[in-house]
Amino acid sequence: MIRIRTLSLLLTILLLSGLSSHAEDGYRLWLRYEKIPNKNILKEYSSQINSIYFEGNSTTIFAAKEELLNGLTGLLGSEIKEINRIKSTGSVVLAVYSSSKLLNELNIAGQLSDLGNEGFLILTTTVKNKKSIVITANTDVGVLYGVFHFLMMIQTNQPIDKINFASAPKIKLRLLNHWDNLDRFVERGYAGFSIWDWHKLPDYIYPQYKDYARANASIGINGTVLTNVNANARVLTEDYLIKVTALANVFRPYGIKVYLTARFSAPIEIGGLKTADPLDNNVRQWWNKKVEEIYKLIPDFGGFLVKANSEGQPGPQNYGRSHSDGANMLADALKPFGGIVMWRAFVYSNETPEDRAKQAYNEFKPLDGKFKDNVLVQVKNGPVDFQPREPFHPLFGSMPKTPLMMEFQITQEYLGQATNLVYLAPMYKECLESDTFTKGKGSTVTKIIDGSIDNHTLTGIAGVANTGTDRNWTGHLFGQANWYAFGRLAWNHQLSSEEIADEWIRMTFSNSKEIVASIKKVMLSSHEYCVNYMTPLGLHHIMGWDHHYGPAPWIKEKHRADWTSVYYHRADSNGIGFDRTATGSNATSQYATQVNNNFSSLETCPDEFLLWFHHLPWNYKMKSGRTLWDKICYKYNWGVNGVRGMIKIWNSLEGKIDPMRFKHVKMLLSIQEKEAAWWRNACLLYFQTFSKMPIPIEYEQPDKTLDYYMSLEFPYAPGI
Ligand code: BDP
């Protein structure tokens, strides 16, 4: 009796954990390859794939084969046979190759010619009279991407009997930027320490390195900047370059190039020179030699990412030179080897008596046309700094002669860090789809960064990574969705947030209609809720000092005004908001006329950006008829209630997904609810000291005093 009970208990546990032989700790990301639970679908697939035929023997083809074999074996629950010749009799075959005589038989040269170096084609067809699914490309890495796409199709239960699907990336450089330090501390990292164990490199290679490469390749990411933009010159010393080489060797089969951040003063710090002046011959020689040394070790090294003359980092302006002087010096050194420079436009100075939101444009716009052809200028999505919501950066469209590279943040520095579930695809899409009007209607940010408007072939997009040593890689399981979404959008910016969420949920959790619909609902509304419980109506930069955790609209009188909150919200007894129209800082003038007019007029300025561009009285009448103060109260409450709605939906999934991940997310959602209410209470109480108006009684009233919220300290908040 007891035994039977124990047995059934064990069975229940197994069932609840999705009958998985693996702990559902999130380590496998979206590449779980669990056996398809639906018997009919499984049967359908099994009848269409019985053997695999591969051609090619590069390390990339080997990686593709390994992935396909492991993936299919897991998904179909039985081992797939590899054959070394396609015979005209026998069972259905999955054939994978990039250059093969077999291709002639298929008559697909036309289709292949559009695919470039990374695209792929998946085709259900006949090869040697036998029904086959062919995965092919012009290159081995294209084949690898095709394999991952095919596995995604199976993971998401798509039909494979009539595939004719071709895809090529729209942006050339699709990179993660790791803000990882050599001591393994990750700046703005909320998932533990850096996954790069520099101390044990080059000899100790963690399995995570390969799994990281697999995950990235599966979403088309083709480069990784290993080190923090606040750079340490030491990574350019021989000892460290050997360590970098070891990582590059792991990533290479997966089509991923390594890049490093170059500290501008490296010639002084590790080169023994007296200057880092970019026009000094010795300095130029030093960089030339350094780059040569790097390429000897890493022949496909990608290039440098540089943060210069920003937030205390050294740069060409220390020597009276311009950003283009600095970038071009490095570009010259990299050019013979095919390397590139990504020079960041994230520059602003507290000493410049100008709205911070305007400074990057003022600095960089005059440099358009002055950069060498292997330089990209990397621009953050918005003009301030990765806030929960920002209008698009006015540099997009303003430097037609320069390839501009997008920089998004995947790590949620200002979006609840690793305790808030905030799906970022809608935020990325909002920016990408913004119309800059710089070349007439339809000049979207997307068309600027994919090069189509200004005919650039060197194009790029970067995401500041959210990975760390946490077992599930990203701290919050749903952080994985943001990594996934970034990669998918970098490959194809036409995908919708919903399509991407759909794929990710099916691969990560389940293909059950109910589970997919519920989780999608949670994800798709999460960003809007977050914006509203943190910074509604265009408010921005009102977070905690230094660590950026939680609300602190009261921050003032610090050594840099542009790092305080009062600089941005400008609340006083008259009203709130930053006048960036012609009567104020005139930041709106940096946009094309249509956009300028749109943001400048109270008639047309979207509510989402109202207080970003306007300073308005507390009793200002909103379009809804509410006063501004009431609307602020309404919005904060809407955000908090939204989180409660997310919790309800999540709780409805209890017992339907494995207990480990269910509980993980449930606990984090309850933290998120507390944090959302904290944001609302602290901000409303603080702004109320100026508005002097009551929080309407239909809303939940703060349960603590403003003094209490202001007294909170977080000296050990992560990621500082
Ligand atoms: C800010 C971060 C800071 C980064 C900086 C940057 O707080 O840690 O160094 O961005 O992008 O948002 O350089």
Image: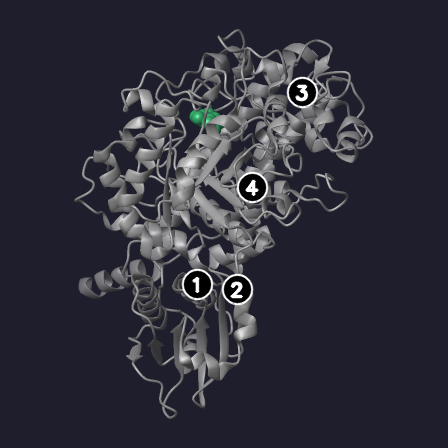
Crowding near the residue tagged with mark 4, few <14, some 14–19, many ≥20 C-alpha atoms within 10 Å: many
Q: Secondary structure at mark 3?
A: loop
Q: First in sequence, mark 3 or 1: give its number.
A: 1
Q: Position of residue 506 (x, y in %)?
A: 47, 59
Can residue 416 be seen from the camera position used here? Answer: no
Secondary structure at badge 2 equals loop
Mark 3 is on which residue type? Ile
| Among the 4 quarters of the image, the one containing residue 269 | top left
Residue at x-position 22% and y-position 66%: 4
Q: Image height check: is 159 above or below 286?
A: below
Amino acid under disc 2 = Leu
Q: Position of residue 334 (x, y in %)?
A: 40, 39
Q: Which mark is residue 115?
A: 2
Image depth: mark 4 or mark 1 in front: 1
Q: Quadrant of the N terminus?
A: bottom left
Mark 3 or mark 4, which is nearer to you? Answer: 4
Rounded to the nearest angstrom, the CA distance separating label 4 from label 2 is: 36 Å
Amino acid on which disc 1 is placed: Gly
Residue that mark 1 sits on = 142
Distance in Å between CA atoms under marks 2 and 3: 58 Å
Disc 2 vs disc 1: Cβ atoms closer than 8 Å?
Answer: yes
Q: Nearer the viewer, mark 3 or mark 1?
A: 1
Q: Which mark is residue 695?
A: 3
